[in-house]
Amino acid sequence: VELYLTIVSEQNTARGHGAVASNLIMLKVESLSNEEEVDLRAKIEALKSEVTKVPSQSQQHTDDELELASKMDNLSSKLDEVDKMISSTDPQVKSLLSSTADVWMPVITATSEERRKFSSSVEGREPEVKANASKKTP
């Protein structure tokens, strides 16, 4: 009981000092028991290493984020260019783009999964389109 109270007292005194606190506690335990506490010391060291571990981000993850950000910047600038071209076009082109927006806007704003579905549906219809075209040709 005395050992426990001493340890708790030392913890409260040294709280927030990390390694200093654990070393003080170890010294106090060893002095009270008159034995070197190798097992306890190893457990405290293992616990300290677990508590102080900082999750590492892989360099690949960081590189991927930078590459993605660069691609997004590039796409944003291209969209700005398209916006400028559309705004400077004649009224007929604006009207055509506006009236067909329901066709091309979903493709531009689609997620990668939606684009894959779109491209697979277009590829699936391709032979059908070729067959229809060959029927029309004499």
Image (cartoon, rainbow, N blue to C red):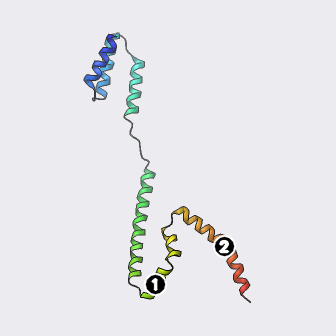
Provide residue 123's location: percent of width, then percent of height.
64, 70
Badge 2 density bin: few <14, some 14–19, many ≥20, Cα 10 Å: few
Badge 1 density bin: few <14, some 14–19, many ≥20, Cα 10 Å: few
Q: Is residue 106 left or right of residue 75?
A: right
**The N terminus lies in quadrant:** top left
What residue is shown with label 2?
125
Q: Amino acid at mark 1?
A: Ser
For the point 37% across and 14% down, the residue is 36
Q: Is residue 28 above or below residue 49?
A: above
**The C terminus lies in quadrant:** bottom right
For the point 45% across and 56% down, the residue is 64
Provide residue 27's location: percent of width, then percent of height.
31, 17
Label 1: element kind: helix
Q: Is residue 113 left or right of residue 54?
A: right
Q: Quadrant of residue 76?
A: bottom left
- Front residue of 82/41: it is 82
Counting residues from the start of the chain, the first of labels 2 and 1 encountered is: 1
Q: Is residue 35 above or below residue 109?
A: above
Q: Amino acid at mark 2?
A: Arg
State how far apart marks 2 and 1 are (Cα). 29 Å
Q: Quadrant of residue 69?
A: bottom left
Provide residue 136's location: percent of width, then percent of height.
71, 86
Q: Is residue 87 above or below residue 124?
A: below
- Front residue of 61/87: it is 87
- Front residue of 91/17: it is 91
Q: Is residue 102 above or below residue 90?
A: above
What residue is shown with label 1?
95
Labelled disc at residue 130: none
